[in-house]
Image: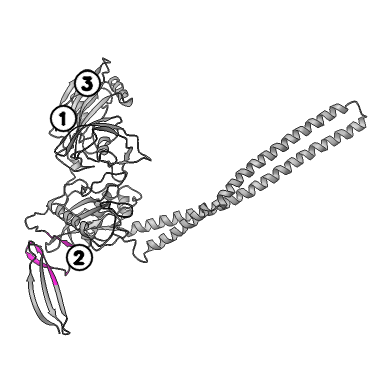
Amino acid sequence: MAKAFFTTMKYLRGLSLLKMAISAYRSGEGRIIIILRTFVSTKNGYSIMGAGLPTFFHSFQADISEIGKAERFNFPFFYEPDALSRLAAAELQTYLEQQEDFVHNFGLTPMEGTPIGKMFGVLVVATSDGALGYLAACSGKLAGRNTHTHFVPPVFDMLTKDSFFLQEEETINALNFQIATLESAAVLPNSKIELEQLTIESELALKRSREAMKVAKSKRKETREQVLGTISDEAYALLIEDLIKQSYRDQHEHAVLKETWKNSLHALQAKIENLQAEIDALKQQRKDKSAKLQARLFDEYQFLNGYGTNKSLLQIFKEAGNIIPPAGAGECAAPKLLQYAFAHQLQPISIAEFWWGSSPASAVRTHKSFYPACKSKCEPILTHMLAGIDVDPNPLLDNPALDKELPIIYEDEAIIVVNKPNEFLSVPGIHIQDSVYTRILARNPTIEGPVIIHRLDMSTSGILVLAKTKFAHHYIQQQFIKHTIEKRYTALLDGVVTNPMGEIKLPLRVDLDDRPRQLVCYEYGKEVHTSYRVVGIEQHKTRIHFFPHTGRTHQLRVHAAHSLGLNCPILGDDLYGKRADRLHLHAGYIKFVHPLTNQEVTFNVPDPF
């Protein structure tokens, strides 16, 4: 029987939330056993942590007694992290800076391998007795593994030993190897080359045969004409009979030659078709197995919600109107965090996701910056999972232009020029109808034609030209199409641009997984061209003029923020940088030819920042 050796209570200096009780006992064999108990802050004082607390529950290391928790769960697709989730993120970032649990090249320090930044998430949670802590997760795999001591596990771990996924993946990989072996072997390509050569040879041989027949026919005709009237009728009849036999013989020999070549070509073609059929059969087998594996995976991914309702990935996306979930659905940090919380009776309080490491080559991601959940993969899943949870209303449904005026800086019988405020739609949106278009129509109900000639992003302020007639619309629109209109934007960049002027040409396309974000894509992106000139540096911020030569969505925002562009996001850019009081981008100058006077007109609006 072990007997007490000593017992003492030790409080960690500077931490009022995390208390540690250390008890030491000497066993009957003389060994000292240390027992460590951790006390967690609750509304009713401190409770012992360990018994009953989930494995991946992290207590806050800092004092949170003066920090209030959120009344409602934040809307994950548009949010500003609250104090607790910021603190949880900061503690996770400290762990990432100091950890020795895994090796992964985030691109922050010189390391071997390709740098790969990752999205991490924290979920502030409360236990049943009110203790506050947080969970941590990483999107996708980390260091080639799904499971780590610091992060919640995946919703379904397909990489566990002897899992059906690994077994089926091995089968599919074997098929891939067979296909690659057959496709890379010399037999098929050599046979195709041989068929091409044989086809050419057959055509040449048959051509020579036809030409020889033609020559023989001419000679027979010449012979008939030469002997006609010079020999007896009996001899002439015998000659004609012989010439006819020669003609039949030539035709027969040509037919035999043609059939011989045909058989040779057919034999080689059959050989190629058999080889290709074998490859096609393997590919179909691979396709069928992949489809079955995918369907089973979709069924294995089961997601809980606030009501305790469980739904499969396939069911969730089917109900959302999508037939097949996109690749990687369910592997993001947010679903992992909520699933673990629901499965372990933890109450979700708030969530935050941040990027850690270097930015991908195509997208714009900033180290340590917070980002909303993605749309295509997470929106259907989180819509299901947050059912039964009191969530902040979607701020994107609110009209930020409700109390804003729309200043008109010029108007005549052909055009209207307005100074659009920031956070004001150019045209009606899906949920918000209030816009420049609707207000101008309400003010001028007799306007003809499409009215809108060009647009500004909702968050961008500045000059917008509208047409009052179809003729004016077409006349000015052609100038936009032909790039004869001069435009200048002013922006305040969050950083210092060293080059005084230059050009940026980065092709862009929409991020299909996270609309409306744009990606740099040299394969499918549209041509995009921007010129710039630095105006000045103000407190580590760059005031700059942009001159867009094309008019793509988010062109200036991506060209400013991307590492291959200026690598300085526009101040207040909530998509490609960090949120501020506003997006500091303003369309302050435009010059074009007036549709009625055929004279150049210029409009200027001072920068509002």
Q: Of the residues under marks 3 and 1, which one precedes in the sequence? A: 3
Report the disc number at residue 54. Answer: 2
Q: Position of residue 507 (x, y in %)?
A: 33, 37
Q: Mark 3 against mark 2, which lies toward the viewer?
A: 3
The residue identified by callout 3 is: 602
Q: What colouring method underlies this structural image?
A: one colour
Q: Position of residue 133 (x, y in %)?
A: 15, 60
The residue identified by callout 1 is: 607
Q: Mark 1 against mark 2, which lies toward the viewer?
A: 1
For marks 3 and 1, give the CA distance.
16 Å
Q: Of the residues under marks 1 and 2, which one precedes in the sequence? A: 2
Which amino acid type corresponds to the residue marked 2 in the rendered image? Pro
Which amino acid type corresponds to the residue marked 1 in the rendered image? Asp
- The C terminus: image quadrant: top left
Q: Going 51% across and 52% down the picture, which residue do you hit?
A: 184
Q: Residues within 10 Å of mark 3 (few under 14, many from 20)?
A: few
* Residue 422 sits above or below residue 337 on the image: above
Occupied quadrant, residue 570: top left
Q: Of the residues under marks 3 and 2, which one precedes in the sequence? A: 2
**Where does the magenta region start and end?**
36-61
- The N terminus: image quadrant: bottom left
Residue 38, magenta (yes or no): yes
For marks 1 and 2, give the CA distance.
54 Å
Q: Residues within 10 Å of mark 2 (few under 14, many from 20)?
A: some
For marks 3 and 2, give the CA distance.
66 Å
